Each structure stands twice: as structure tokens, then as C-alpha cells.
């Protein structure tokens, strides 16, 4: 415990553990790291969350709002067709939330700690799947 205090670690609830031998240990909580990048005018968010089995990588972006049927029924119909066509993608999912925001989401699990090549590989897999549909959606938004 003295070593943890020397490091200046924040010690929160549940951070101090005692094993069967009576020895104390301090666990530092794992927090998600957040990253952002821009591509084709959209801001993408990336979250890396380490856990016991590996690292969970999540990526998402807000694409734009679906127009209401009364505003532009033809545009809404075309956007809906594009979103249905994107349903087969393996690394990216397009969803419309309850506020009619079109979002693109992706998630991958990486064994162990994420290295830079792992990080870039997963992002590129996501972008390769989503980008053609993002370009088509951009024509209607």
C-alpha cells in the first residue's frame, strides 16, 4: 500500500484488496480511452475499454437526421433504402435513434492489449465497410 501511495495513485472504493495471506494490493481501475478523428466531414469517436479478456473497441459517428415524411417523403424513402441495403455489413451498423439521428456504429474485441496496428486495422475494417454508404447517404442529407 505504501508503494501505491508513493506513486500518487488515486485510491477509490473497491481499489484496495486483501488476499488469503493478509497482503494488501491496490488495483488501479481501467478506464476507457477516447479518441476522435474526422473523415469526409464527419467526426468519428473511438473508445478503447480494457477488461480481463482483452480490449473492446467501439467506434461511432452521427451521420445526420432523417427528414420527416411530411418534409421530404422521397428523400426519406431513398435514405431508408440505403439504410436497408447496408444491413449486411459485418463491421459497421447503421441505426436510426428515437430522435431520427442516423448513426453508424462498430464494435470489435481484440485479445490482450491493443497495439497501434490492431487499432488501425479495426478502424480501417470499419471505414471500408461504412464509407461507400456514407457517401451515398451524404448525397441525400
Image: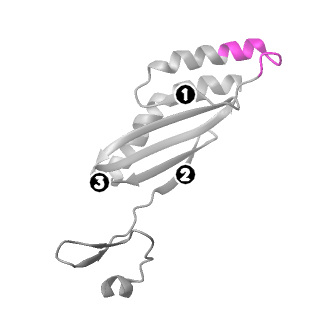
Q: Which mark is residue 52?
A: 3
Q: CA distance from mark 1 to mark 3?
A: 29 Å
Q: Which mark is residue 134?
A: none
Q: Is the residue marked by circle 2 packed among few (<14), some (14-19), or many (20+) residues within 10 Å?
A: few
* Residue marked by disc 1: 94
Q: Nearer the viewer, mark 1 or mark 2?
A: 1
User: Residue placed farthest to the right in the image?
Assistant: 71
Q: Nearer the viewer, residue 122 or 69?
A: 69
Residue at the (38%, 40%) spot, across then down: 108
Q: Badge 3 local density, few (<14 within 10 Å), some, or many (20+)?
A: few
Q: Nearer the viewer, residue 74 or 8?
A: 8
Q: Earlier in the sequence, mark 1 or mark 2?
A: 2
Q: Is residue 4 above or below residue 79?
A: below
Give the mark, 2 or 3, whose residue is nearer the N terminus: 2
Q: Secondary structure at mark 3?
A: loop
Q: Answer with mark 1 or mark 3, whichever residue precedes in sequence.
A: 3
Q: Nearer the viewer, residue 109 or 43?
A: 109
Does dot 1 land on a helix, a strand or a loop? strand
Residue 76 x, y percent position in the rendering: 71, 17
Left/right placement of residue 40 relative to residue 112 reads: right
Q: Residue furthest left?
A: 21
- Mark 1 is surrounded, within 10 Å at the Cα level, by few (under 14), some (14 to 19) or many (20 or more) other residues, namely many
Q: Does residue 32 appear to the left or right of 135 in the view shown?
A: left
The residues colored magenta run 68-78
Q: Quadrant of the C terminus?
A: top right
Question: Which residue is pictured at 55% across the width and 24% down the height?
Answer: 133
Query: What residue is disc 2 on?
Result: 36
Q: Nearer the viewer, residue 79 or 68?
A: 68
The quadrant of the picture occupied by the N terminus is bottom left
Relative placement, left or right, of 138 versus 60 is: right
Amino acid at each position: 500500500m505504501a508503494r501505491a501511495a508513493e506513486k500518487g495513485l488515486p485510491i477509490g472504493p473497491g481499489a484496495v484488496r486483501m488476499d488469503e495471506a493478509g497482503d494488501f494490493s491496490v488495483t488501479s481501475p481501467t478506464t476507457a480511452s477516447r479518441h476522435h478523428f474526422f473523415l469526409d466531414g464527419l467526426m468519428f469517436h473511438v473508445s478503447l475499454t480494457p477488461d480481463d479478456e482483452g480490449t473492446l473497441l467501439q467506434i461511432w459517428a452521427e451521420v445526420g437526421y432523417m427528414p420527416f415524411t411530411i418534409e421530404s417523403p422521397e428523400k426519406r424513402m431513398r435514405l431508408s433504402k440505403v439504410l436497408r441495403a447496408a444491413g449486411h455489413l459485418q463491421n459497421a451498423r447503421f441505426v436510426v435513434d428515437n430522435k431520427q439521428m442516423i448513426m453508424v456504429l462498430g464494435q470489435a474485441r481484440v485479445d490482450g492489449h491493443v497495439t497501434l496496428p490492431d487499432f488501425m486495422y479495426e478502424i480501417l475494417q470499419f471505414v471500408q465497410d461504412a464509407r461507400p454508404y456514407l457517401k451515398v447517404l451524404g448525397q441525400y442529407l
